Image (spheres, rainbow, N blue to C red):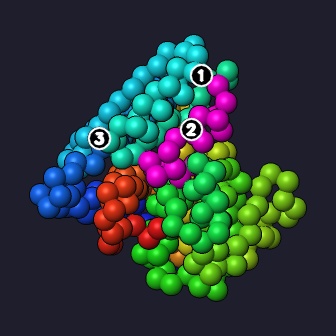
Amino acid sequence: MSAEIIDGKAFAAGLRGRVAEKVAELKAGHGITPGLAVVLVGEDPASQVYVRNKGRQTLEAGMTSFEHRLPADAPEAELLDLVARLNADPAVHGILVQLPLPGHMNENLVINAIAPEKDVDGFHVINAGRLATGQDAMVPCTPLGCLMLLRDRLGALSGLNAVVIGRSNIVGKPMAQLLLRESCTVTTAHSRTRDIAALCRSADILVAAIGRPGTITGEWIKPGATVIDVGINRVETPEGKTKLVGDVDFESAREVAGAITPVPGGVGPMTIACLLANTITACCRIHGLPDPEGLTAG
Ligand code: GUN
């Protein structure tokens, strides 16, 4: 059996289309243009690519994009000052500070300085707490995108065994919270987990967010399981070029899984689409409007 390939690229394009419709509605009906501010500190090449893509897709959706760049040696106080100005700016509905930050900055301090209602990354401790306690939250974009793909493929997730590999604040922990909210039986695995292969073989839903290429092979996968690969790893090919691969060994996994996300073209495109959707949600909440319907599963 060969798994269904989950087309995250097409799904994300559809979501961006729904975002653009909602933006047009907010402009025409309320005179509101949703605005997203992205802050980049330093010149990390991967971060620069992400930030450029975010800016382009924000504009394509009809929203306002604000981009702020600080040098890698900027004092933390300068970044906090910028965040305070964005918090107070009525044209800004979403604020994203690109991570990682340079070593002299305290990431938690900076994230928690963002107004929770503008925290479209969902990283603020208030949003993490709201998600964990079942209250309306801004939900981190990558796990939100994974959940949308899972719901689209499986419908109701209630009662399914879900294994999330990885315990980061950006993916693993919020992913586990979202799956728990869907009434899955959730296990979070990590580098110290014993007999991780056997645990993975119990999973109807397997989410891999490890950051190591090709870690999960077909032998770790329950036949028919849905596999979501969050990994984006750049590796060298035998020809001396580079290519992107996931945390899952795609070729062996696709022989066993029922459905699987490819890398690239799976989870990756969903992250920015969900960021745009979160910005619309933030904009609606800030203006006292009801949450937009049908944008996200969050
Ligand atoms: N760095 C890698 N992923 C992310 C993300 O989702 N948000 C932010 N702010 N930084 C990141």
Q: Closer to the camera: disc 1 or disc 3?
A: 3
| Observer-nearest of 112 and 158 | 112
**Structural distance between the alpha carbons of marks 3 and 2:** 18 Å
Amino acid, disc 1: Glu
Secondary structure under the numbered disc 1 in the rendered image: helix
The residue that label 1 is drawn on is 76
Q: In the rendered image, which quarter is residue 223 located in?
A: bottom right
- Residue corresponding to mark 3: 91
- Amino acid on which disc 2 is placed: Ala
Asked if labels 2 and 3 touch by Cβ distance under 8 angstroms, the answer is no
Left or right relative to 241: residue 94: left
Give percent across and percent down for residue 70.
47, 19
**Residue drawn 38% across the image and 60% down it:** 285
Disc 3 is placed on an element classified as: loop
Q: Looking at the image, is mark 1 or mark 3 earlier in the sequence?
A: 1
- Residue 90 in the image: state x and y as whole percent: 32, 42
Q: Which residue is mark 2?
A: 113
Residue at point 49% right, 58% down?
138
In the rendered view, does 269 fall on the left or right side of 210? left
Can residue 113 be found in the magenta stretch?
yes
